[in-house]
Amino acid sequence: MASLDRFRNLCIIAHIDHGKSTLADRMLELCGAVDPRDMRAQYLDSMDIERERGITIKLQSVRLDYRDHVLHLIDTPGHVDFGYEVSRSLAACEGAILLVDAAQGIEAQTLANCYLALENNLEIVAALNKIDLPAADPDRYAAEIEKVLGIPANEILRVSAKTGEGVSELLDAVVERIPAPEGDPDATLQGLIFDSHFDQYRGVVSSVRIMNGTLRTGERVKFVQAGSVYSAEEIGVRRPDPTPIASLGAGEVGYLIAGIKDVGEARSGETITTPVHPAPALEGYLEPKPMVFCGLYPIDGDEFTSLREALDKLRLNDSSYTFQPESSGALGFGFRCGFLGLLHMEIVRERLEREFNLSLIATAPSVQYVVHKENGDIITIDNPSELPTSTEVSLVEEPFLRATILTPTAYTGTLMELCQARRGEMIKIEYLSPERMELVYELPLAEVVTDFFDQMKSRTQGYASLDYEPAGYRSSELVKVDILLNAVPVDAFSMIVHKDKAYNYGLRMTEKLKELIPRQLFDVPIQAAIGGRIIARETVKAKRKDVLAKCYGGDISRKNKLLEKQKAGKKRMKNIGRVEVPQEAFVSALRLDD
Amino acid sequence: MSAPVESTDFGVYVHIPFCSRRCDYCAFATWTDRDHLIGEYVDAVCLELDRSVSSGELVSATSVFFGGGTPSLIPGELLVRILDRIPLAPDAEVTVECNPDTVTAELAAIYFAGGVNRVSFGVQSMVPHVLTALGRTHDPASVARAVGFARNAGFLKLNLDLIYGGAGETLDDWCETLDAVIALRPTHVSAYALTIEPGTPLASDPARHPDDDDQADKYLAAEERLRNAGLLNYEISNWAVPGDECRHNELYWAQGDYLGFGCAAHSHRQGRRWWNVRTPDRYIETVAAGESTEASFELLDPEHRHVEGLRLALRTNVGVPSDALSDEDRELLDPLLEEAGGRLRLTVDGRLLANEVAVRLR
């Protein structure tokens, strides 16, 4: 298969901020793929949110000509929420560049992805980046990489993506060390979809790696897992601008447009083949599984239909979230949505607001609980208000994670404290080097989806990094804390928490709500309760004065308008147990960050 | 639904837009730098009154009210010249708002001789540090002096205006003001909660904004002390010896007809409301040019007028018909209301929460 010899398929594994996008920029330049006049930073990150947050969400692939070789560079998402997408992009490669910041060392998620790459038999070309920085200590981190990954320190390259130093040597190493793809161009078509995005003019555009056979323009293509057949309208490669070509052969990477209207029909991991005598499906396909849930409600109840349309449309672009209508006594009509993780949740919400011009209230994030009832039934709930009363419940199971934290040694104590406070159970603690530590804990997902990541970052000045994977369900002593306003439970504020933390949650919410709920005509008790037992209470004292002091001839119109405004304000409030609650109170009370 | 009580009274309001200084809570149409316009302004008001009489629009008034600004700032003769133009019904009430600082024995005598029969003094507080905080110049002693001048001139109807809730005013300070005011035996007291008006210097200084609970305590103190002194509440912020209620203001609360003269003055006739150009300069020009002084107007549709009528009546001891609230709202608001003769009136606590009732009237 001599014709495949000149191909090299690779991705870059790197932590956020370790310079992946900058390295990609340099590679584009070195291979003459982008006219210097058109060059911009983070060339391959196409979404505004990606540039703002400095992370890659959607994958891009680019075809580069380097000397006599053709490189297919596949971008990988830079966040643990998108671990599955990472695994699919790895499956499309024979090798990976491991890029590590020479001033910071390897991070947890990078390490995890690297192990994943090794499991997939990828050849790792390791490089330390940012050697131009005064704080760079490449020798130390090369030794660390050797220890944790077994890559000989003397094989680790040293580059500065910023200045371009060492980048051509890195490309030489890629060509030399990463094997050419294998595959039979004459066999039945068998290709791997490793990313799809929705283009409003072209429909779904999928990134595809051909494993065997040849994909030709105009041919019928079967999508094995989706069970549908489309016609290949356009096949091309990104150089990085999309360039149509007649066919893609075994070992090649490119894009496919087949008139598909929904990315759910061409998910990451999907196998494409010929409709007649199809090849078997490739291994490793998984349905996306939401881990974190929240209710999304329009602030203006009239926007419910707009929200439904927006969720439908955005799903054409991101099939990994789920949604179904639900209603809340407090918030009205909305949707219970499931996400891959907290970042994914934030991104989807932000895109709904930004791209569809909506104002949304998101309820506190929740996980999926398995509830064993006394009568033997087992139910799954993802909304705390669905938890049956304690007398009906025999036990509740919650999802756990196996979390790996890499940290400078100095922060070990504070991180152990954090993990213990979050009900973590230590599995492993080990020195990576005299300066760095690996901690492995099993933690309840619910404790991680609140503010674990932020806490970890702030306790370690940003130096610790986190990776996690699901670790099954376990029964825990969980209770539902209800918040009652004037003796009426407010479903939007119900939360399932460990019994040791119930009091704290109750106290925090009642205190917060006391500040947020305006004074009413009567004293309003705000209570936190577990079942019938009150665990915290605050009171909003009745208001005593709400009157216009003066109203004479020249004032009547203006004063009447003030009253009209007040009347209109009352209409916008939610009435709960005769208490008028402003929308802003929900938004503020449900905000995570305080 | 029964209609609010229709008034057959007819009022005239005259706006005098001049002050010696502006209080920092004040949002009224008044100027401190245009005293040179006083003569021309009075001429213009007289001319507009004459035109209104000859057109048959201005008929005999049951009440006249000189407001401002500070009407007592202009020479007494000029004010009387204006009053002379206005046809009066027998027993018409004629009020002039006065700054106690500017009232002299002579001025009081000129007013009384000219037909004014009620004076209203802007007292605000009888406690010096509270007055200073309100940006007022007068000495509390000048109030007693001015009241003396008015009595000597023959005035029987005396109103004292008060403001509570200024920065630094304690409940004791307020009670001291009330006691000092009561000692002057006024026939009428208006006590206003200090209110933040947008665009005033006070509005931009949150540290000096009043506290609702403090103002509620002070309102209750006023109600108690004034009632004990024989002054009965008949509108949220007004107390009077029975029979000495302000007839002119009652006209406003009964949606009666009135004509306003001078800049920024408002008029109302049968659901049509209009107001004059805002500045004295513009007013003088407009009158001189023989043009209409009306700046703008609004027409109240019957529904709007009905609700507005209820809201105004609610402020007074006239109250509203008992069907002006739904049963549900009636129940919710029960502690704020008392019922008598098929009408609902605000209780003392209810007066403090009148907006909660007003926005539910139907």
Image (cartoon, coloured by chain):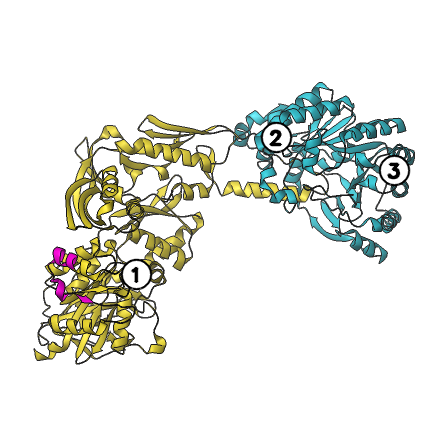
Chain colours: A yellow, B cyan
Q: Quadrant of residue A560?
A: top right
- Going by the image, does B29 lie left or right of A566? right
**What is the x, y in percent for residue B205?**
60, 42
Label 3 is placed on what type of residue?
Leu
Q: In this picture, is B349 found above or below A90?
A: above
Q: Label 3, secondary structure: give it.
A: strand
For the residue marked with disc 1, what is the amino acid?
Leu
In this view, the mark in front (2 or 3): 2
Label for residue A316?
Answer: 1
Chain that bears disc 1: A
**In the picture, residue A204 is in which quadrant?**
bottom left
Residue farthest to the top, as pictured: B228
Find residue B215 and name its label: 2
Residue A128: say if magenta. Answer: no
Q: Name which residue lies at 35% across and 32% down.
A: A506
Q: Which residues are magenta?
A: A143-162
Q: Residue A354: tell me if it is visible.
A: yes
